């Protein structure tokens, strides 16, 4: 009888212990899967946030480019309306009236300054942009928007200094 009582007690312990161990192992497995899911979700959220920041920065840069282009076009429109004969008075008044105009000058086609402040930055600017000439159309490029649009797949268009 003692043998059957100890066997019965051992059976009760197995019936209690095995499901408890199985439930513990199952809970640990579920916790591990939840941890992996949270890590994946965290990575996806970080990636989405990175993409959103990149897209926002691109949009800001694009808006700044549009703003600068509009200002540049407005300045170039005003400059094109300048009188051809004796623009000195117009340029001096323009410098006083428009806060966007810092230096005014008149130069020859080869970059020599005829009127205005021959500052080193102005002279170096005259040697580079925007006084280039499009070789295909033989048109003087005054503003960056006058450049021909080059899309992917086309050959790059080269420019030389106008004379």
Image (cartoon, grey):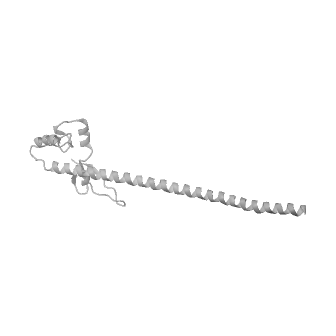
**Labels in figure, total:** 0
Please state the horizontal and vertical placement of residue 151, each as a whole percent of the image. 33, 59
Q: Residue at x 17, y 51 (%)?
A: 77
Please state the horizontal and vertical placement of residue 111, each as a whole percent of the image. 21, 42
Please state the horizontal and vertical placement of residue 48, each as a whole percent of the image. 46, 56
Name the image quarter holding residue 119.
top left
Judged left or right of residue 152, residue 29 is right
Q: Nearer the viewer, residue 90 or 87?
A: 90
Name the image quarter holding residue 2.
bottom right
Judged left or right of residue 148, residue 105 is left
Q: Nearer the viewer, residue 3 or 17?
A: 3
Judged left or right of residue 105, residue 17 is right
Q: Residue at x 28, y 53 (%)?
A: 66
Q: Residue at x 32, y 53 (%)?
A: 62
Quadrant for the N terminus, please.
bottom right
Which residue is most to the left?
A: 85
Q: Is residue 66 visible?
A: yes
Q: Residue at x 23, y 39 (%)?
A: 122
Q: Is residue 141 visible?
A: no
């Amino acid at each position: 009888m003692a043998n059957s009582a100890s066997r019965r007690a051992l059976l009760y312990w197995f019936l209690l212990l095995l499901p408890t161990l199985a439930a513990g192992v199952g809970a640990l497995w579920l916790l591990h899967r939840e941890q992996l899911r949270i890590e994946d979700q965290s990575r996806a959220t970080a990636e989405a946030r990175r993409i959103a920041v990149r897209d926002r920065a691109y949009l800001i840069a694009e808006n700044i480019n549009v703003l600068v282009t509009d200002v540049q076009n407005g300045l170039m429109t005003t400059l094109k309306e300048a009188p051809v004969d004796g623009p000195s008075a117009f340029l001096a008044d323009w410098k006083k009236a428009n806060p966007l105009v810092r230096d005014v000058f008149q130069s020859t086609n080869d970059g020599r300054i005829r009127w205005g402040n021959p500052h080193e930055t102005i002279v170096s600017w005259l040697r580079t942009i925007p006084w280039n000439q499009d070789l295909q159309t033989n048109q003087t490029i005054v503003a960056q928007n006058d450049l021909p649009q080059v899309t992917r797949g086309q050959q790059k268009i080269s420019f030389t200094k106008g004379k």
